[in-house]
Amino acid sequence: MDGKARVIFVLGGPGVGKGTQCQKIQEQNEEFVHLSAGELLRQARESGSENGEVIMQCINQGTIVPAEITVDLLRQAMVAHGWEKKRFLVDGFPRNEDNYQKWYDMMEAVEVEYCVFMDCDVDAMAERIKARGSARSDDNPEVFKKRITTYNEQTKPIIDRFSDLGKLRRVDGNLDVDSVYEQMLNILKD
Ligand code: ADP
Ligand code: C5P
Ligand code: MG
């Protein structure tokens, strides 16, 4: 870990298309690695992590897992990919104050370039989750509502903070996948 890892946070509400965009960017642009915080948590739970119980409870309540757990998983994944070799698209993080503070407390040798905010109407996000048709235990109307509450109350203030710091890049997430992708590429050029 001689050099710095370069990180771009990608935030937006549930179902906005964070995973879709980050995956596409990773596939079509060699310098990027996509890391979904939610996906890392689901994998940790499925692989029998000692934190499996708390992860499952938070996911099923639409609340945020204690940040030590998530930051550790992100760090391990970044090390596995080669710390300073790539630009990491960290999707779904930092979701609240705890995520934000622990990231800066626990992570050294990291440069956060900026945060991309995928902005979208709640109704469109609800439709997209429905259409996703996943087997995820939190992809149902009841937990979706709780995830939106968490997003409004805890994630939006973090998005505002990046804006105040001059580190927010907004895209219109209401548009189709290709149009959003075009906006993403425009941002990632810098
Ligand atoms: P997130 O990771 O933000 O929760 P996903 O990338 O999993 O969201 O996308 C949620 C669902 O919406 C998926 O079924 C995906 O195919 C679809 N989707 C993603 N982006 C768009 C878009 N711009 N327009 C319409 N549907 C989209
Ligand atoms: O981003 P994704 O929709 O995959 O997140 C699913 C769930 O994982 C969230 O609702 C939350 O319970 C958990 N999560 C978390 N902390 C993060 C990202 C996801 O607790 N930084
Ligand atoms: Mg996702």
Image: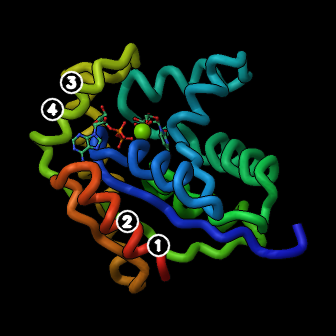
Q: CA distance from mark 4 to mark 1?
A: 28 Å
- Which residue is pictured at 53% across the width and 61% down the height? 100
User: Which residue lies most toward the bottom here?
Assistant: 166
User: Which residue lies most toward the front here?
Assistant: 28
Residue identifier under label 3:
130
Q: CA distance from mark 4 to mark 2?
A: 22 Å
**Type of amino acid at the residue the image marks with label 3:** Lys
Q: CA distance from mark 3 to mark 2?
A: 24 Å
**Type of amino acid at the residue the image marks with label 2:** Met
Q: Quadrant of residue 70?
A: top right
Query: Residue 184 bears which disc, if any?
Result: 2
**Type of amino acid at the residue the image marks with label 4:** Glu
Residue 86 percent location from the top left of the image = 70, 63
- Circles 4 and 2, Cβ within 8 Å, touching? The answer is no
Q: CA distance from mark 3 to mark 4?
A: 5 Å
- Circles 3 and 4, Cβ within 8 Å, touching? The answer is yes
Up-down relation of residue 74 to residue 146 (above or below) = below
Quadrant assignment for ligand 2? top left
**N-terminal of the two: label 4 or label 1?**
4
- Which residue is pictured at 21% across the width and 34% down the height? 128
- Circles 1 and 2, Cβ within 8 Å, touching? The answer is yes
Up-down relation of residue 33 to residue 19 (above or below) = below
Q: Give the crowd class for mark 4: few <14, some 14-19, many >=20 residues within 10 Å.
A: few
- Which residue is pictured at 25% across the width and 19% down the height? 140
4 or 2: mark nearer the eye: 2
**Type of amino acid at the residue the image marks with label 1:** Leu
Q: Give the crowd class for mark 3: few <14, some 14-19, many >=20 residues within 10 Å.
A: some
- Which residue is pictured at 73% across the width and 22% down the height? 50
**N-terminal of the two: label 3 or label 2?**
3
Residue identifier under label 4:
127
Front in this rendered view, residue 188 or 155: 188
